[in-house]
């Protein structure tokens, strides 16, 4: 596989997510970091990019980067959009229409209509549009998906998933700019905690079960009462394969750190996994003893083997999970260039359709929360 060229928009010096993308994209030697518009302040972005070795491909803004890369014979093969939520649609749309493959941070858009538009553009142009639900890159999450698909726990009855932390629990910190924007409708949209973290848990439920959410009922609350948007939500949902779902997400759960976890219960067994202990998948066959599946052990699925780099007993963390998404995308881009089929074990990266479904669910949660938990259709109109 020939080495590909990668660029990033946002993720500047001091950002939370930028360093993770830099590490993840280059981890396997599949991408070279060639171009970037890394800060909304042009001078800062250019300076940081040049210090990272981007030279004249350190751009002052994303529009400049788009025009500059379109003119090059050695243009980037993939651009990551790691900017504030309210800018995702505009930038993703422009680069897709400009002929580039895009990995967009979640949420992909602010509205369902924007999501429908992105899906339409990706189909029309044939360019890849992926969404960074990066936790689906964990090896044992993929093995969990494979076990469910092959029927190891029978027909799925119940999914219980959560993403709860306590890092926004201090009311005295509510005016901190790094916190405040998340609860500002002008910047975050119709939802705060569910759009930020809950959609990771909801997407995880769909990813591992192979089922999509059809309807939901939500109880949302702002426990810090000066916030306009919710900092805690409980969501019940139903899936198109018959599974029942329960989801809790919170940013005021003091004592919780990361808090992404999922349990799936079928007719003949159960599975559970937690992002804070990602090397173990717990499997309970009906009427038998609990089994602990270790990442890196023998006889796992091809999906798990492909996404394991470190020998058993050593920790693999979030950047390596993100790196698996980049490895999937490298395989998808290379397969298209070479006119061959993608490796099925790599065709697991979250796509624009996943971003659209998530945005429809975000709006359904917000509306249901305001309507005292009314059950609402969680699907975008194009998928009903």
Image (cartoon, rainbow, N blue to C red):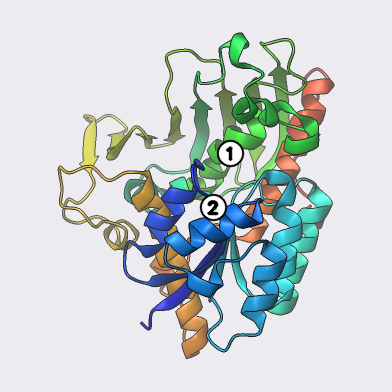
Q: Residue at x 60, y 30 (%)?
A: 178
On the image, numbered disc 2 is attached to which residue? 132
The quarter holding residue 68 reads bottom right
In this view, the residue in front, 365 or 73, is: 73
In this view, the residue in front, 17 or 12, is: 12
* Image vertical order of residue 100 relative to residue 59, above or below: below
Indicate which disc residue 294 carries.
Answer: none
Q: Please say whether residue 321 is visible from this viewpoint.
A: yes
The quarter holding residue 214 reads top right
* Image vertical order of residue 191 relative to residue 15, above or below: above
* Image vertical order of residue 238 relative to residue 180, above or below: below
Q: Please say whether residue 81 is visible from this viewpoint.
A: no
Image spot of residue 24 (x, y percent): 39, 56
If you read the primary sequence from the N terminus, does the residue marked by circle 1 or circle 2 appear first? 2
Q: CA distance from mark 1 to mark 2?
A: 14 Å
Mark 2 Cα within 10 Å, few/some/many (few <14, many 20+)? Answer: many
Quarter holding the N terminus is bottom left
On the image, numbered disc 1 is attached to which residue? 202
Q: Residue at x 31, y 66 (%)?
A: 28
* Image vertical order of residue 49 relative to residue 78, above or below: above
Q: Residue at x 82, y 29 (%)?
A: 367
Q: Secondary structure at mark 2?
A: loop
Q: Residue at x 65, y 22 (%)?
A: 233
Image spot of residue 335 (x, y percent): 47, 81
Image spot of residue 213 (x, y percent): 66, 42
């Amino acid at each position: 596989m020939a080495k590909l060229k990668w660029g990033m928009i946002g993720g500047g010096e001091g950002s939370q997510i930028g360093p993770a993308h830099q590490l993840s994209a280059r981890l396997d030697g599949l991408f070279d970091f060639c171009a970037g518009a890394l800060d909304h302040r042009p001078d800062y972005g250019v300076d940081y990019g040049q210090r990272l070795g981007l030279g004249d491909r350190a751009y002052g803004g994303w529009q400049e980067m788009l025009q500059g890369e379109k003119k090059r014979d050695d243009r980037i093969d993939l651009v990551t959009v790691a900017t504030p939520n309210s800018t995702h649609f505009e930038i993703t749309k422009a680069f897709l229409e400009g002929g580039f493959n895009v990995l967009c941070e979640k949420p992909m858009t602010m509205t369902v209509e924007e999501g429908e538009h992105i899906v339409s553009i990706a189909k029309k142009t044939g360019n890849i549009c992926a969404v960074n639900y990066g936790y689906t890159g964990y090896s044992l999450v993929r093995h969990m998906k494979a076990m469910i698909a092959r029927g190891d726990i029978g027909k799925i009855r119940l999914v219980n998933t959560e993403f709860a932390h306590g890092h926004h629990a201090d009311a005295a910190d509510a005016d901190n700019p790094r916190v405040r924007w998340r609860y500002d409708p002008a910047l975050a949209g119709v939802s705060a905690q569910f759009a930020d973290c809950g959609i990771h848990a909801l997407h995880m439920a769909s990813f591992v079960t192979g089922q999509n959410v059809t309807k939901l009922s939500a109880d949302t609350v702002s426990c810090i009462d000066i916030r306009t948007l919710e900092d805690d939500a409980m969501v019940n949902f139903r899936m198109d394969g018959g599974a029942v779902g329960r989801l809790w997400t919170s940013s005021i759960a003091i004592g919780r750190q990361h808090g992404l976890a999922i349990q799936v219960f079928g007719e003949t067994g159960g599975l559970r996994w937690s992002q804070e202990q990602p090397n173990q998948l717990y499997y309970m066959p009906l009427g038998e003893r609990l089994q602990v599946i270790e990442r890196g052990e023998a006889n796992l699925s091809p999906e798990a083997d492909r996404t394991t780099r470190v020998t058993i007993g050593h920790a693999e963390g979030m950047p390596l999970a993100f790196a698996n998404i980049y490895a999937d995308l490298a395989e998808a881009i290379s397969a298209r260039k070479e006119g061959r089929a993608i490796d099925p074990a790599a065709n697991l990266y979250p796509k624009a359709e996943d971003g659209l479904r998530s945005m429809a669910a975000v709006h359904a949660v917000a509306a249901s929360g305001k309507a005292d938990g009314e059950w609402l259709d969680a699907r975008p109109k194009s998928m009903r």
